[in-house]
Amino acid sequence: MTNTKTVTAGVLLIGDELLSGRTQDTNLGVIAKFLVPLGVQISEARILADNADVIRDSVKAFSERYDYVFTTGGIGPTHDDITADCIAAAFDLGISEREDALAILRPLYEGRDFNAARRRMARIPDGASLIDNPVSKAPGFQTRNVFTLAGVPQIMKGMLPDIAHRIKGGPKVYQITVSTSEIGEGDAAEGLAQIEANHAGVSIGSYPWFNNDLRGINFVARGQDESVLEDVRIELEAFVKTLLSGYLR
Amino acid sequence: MTNTKTVTAGVLLIGDELLSGRTQDTNLGVIAKFLVPLGVQISEARILADNADVIRDSVKAFSERYDYVFTTGGIGPTHDDITADCIAAAFDLGISEREDALAILRPLYEGRDFNAARRRMARIPDGASLIDNPVSKAPGFQTRNVFTLAGVPQIMKGMLPDIAHRIKGGPKVYQITVSTSEIGEGDAAEGLAQIEANHAGVSIGSYPWFNNDLRGINFVARGQDESVLEDVRIELEAFVKTLLSGYLR
């Protein structure tokens, strides 16, 4: 079994609209799927209001606690876009309109007003490196182990390719799923715990599903060793068969 | 203007599957929409792995920081369902299979095996009051200001009606939306900040939207005074017209 240290990430999803029920976040899942093949596991995510103190403190705490931190939202041109300043405050860094970011934005507004609001998107903490934004140009940025990305899903997603090469992942976590209908979680619980206990380094989750009158369970096993996971799959499938035959008796 | 203290909530969404990209949380938005008419605002949400220490510490912190706390997930019969024990640990309470909860579950398993796993769903912290589950029976529970709910969306939603009467909300927060296409956020930013500054107690968010080649902004104003919000709506609409006429010049 591989025994390398797990590489972790924390994600901060920023914006009042995510907490009011107005907007459904979808960025977390996209970031999670991006990180799996890189060997990085998300340990925790927080959804934060547009509150400078809370954002600053959360960035600081996550930056110390996790190997990598992702923030989404709050880097546009309007007054409610405060993330860049919060990142600078979290690390006691200066922040200003940076020439490298201005150079990216300026051509977009040729013949139009490159006003203070638009220049606000060039406010980058001192020492941060820019993250390419192929969709709408205004860059994200990396400050130490913190990647600051846009909140709009299409734009956020477009920034990820310029992050992959900056990440030093750990062992990849693989997952297998065995699905069944009919069986109740209560009948599966004991045997399931036993299968998990028999395979060090494997965690098994039990997720009931409902579809009109049908119901069942997805058993999801996760671990770093693909061959052990294959053993677990075979055991789970046999286990399900045994349970089902019990139902038919 | 009403000046009563805002009543706040924190939400803890519990489960590895929400962090791995496997499952998209939808409970947060449902809880938010349930709380709006009760006059409760969600201040923060956290998505937590199945890690007992982290869950316990988060419950404790949220219970002190916010007026109400909601947890979703981890109250089923399998080994990965650890939320009830974490709640008990957070408040230094005992926990056991409680007769009131057993009485709800027992009839479900008549003629079937009411085994240890199923009885696990009757493990309730001492002193907690049960929350009715009309969908699948196994109850949620309230411990002080913390409501512990199921993770499966249909079941979670079914528990909310038995919570409404336990909540003492504050002033309701209303919201109005003015939508526009064409306009760039950079052109709107300065005027928008001015409109917000002119109306104490109103916060205005600016949310760009994208739809194939079309793009625009939703301006969302939130506040406790409906008549002030109507003024804001009129100002926003006039503002949008002025901006659009500038584009046509």
Image (spheres, coloured by chain):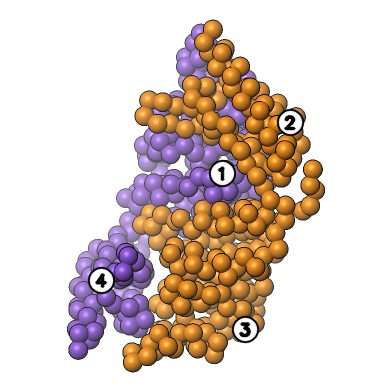
Chain colours: A purple, B orange
Q: Residue at x 52, y 84 (%)?
A: B101
Q: CA distance from mark 1 to mark 4?
A: 37 Å
Dots 3 and 2 on the same chain: yes
Q: CA distance from mark 4 to mark 2?
A: 57 Å
Q: Quadrant of residue A224?
A: bottom left
Left or right: residue B198 versus residue A210 is right
CB atoms at circles 2 and 1 under 8 Å apart?
Answer: no
CB atoms at circles 1 and 4 under 8 Å apart?
Answer: no
Residue with the mark numbered 2: B197
Q: Nearer the viewer, residue B142 or A232?
A: B142
Q: Which numbered dot is residue A17?
A: 1
Q: Kindly identify the amino acid type of the residue bearing the numbered disc 4.
A: Thr
Q: Residues within 10 Å of mark 1 (few under 14, many from 20)?
A: some
Q: Kindly identify the amino acid type of the residue bearing the numbered disc 3.
A: Asp
Dots 3 and 1 on the same chain: no
Where disc 1 sits, the SS reads: helix
Left or right: residue B204 versus residue A217 is right
Where disc 3 sits, the SS reads: loop
Q: Which numbered dot is residue A180?
A: 4
CB atoms at circles 3 and 4 under 8 Å apart?
Answer: no
Where disc 4 sits, the SS reads: strand
Residue with the mark numbered 3: B126
**Residue A170: image x %, image y %?**
37, 54
Q: Kindly identify the amino acid type of the residue bearing the numbered disc 2.
A: Ala
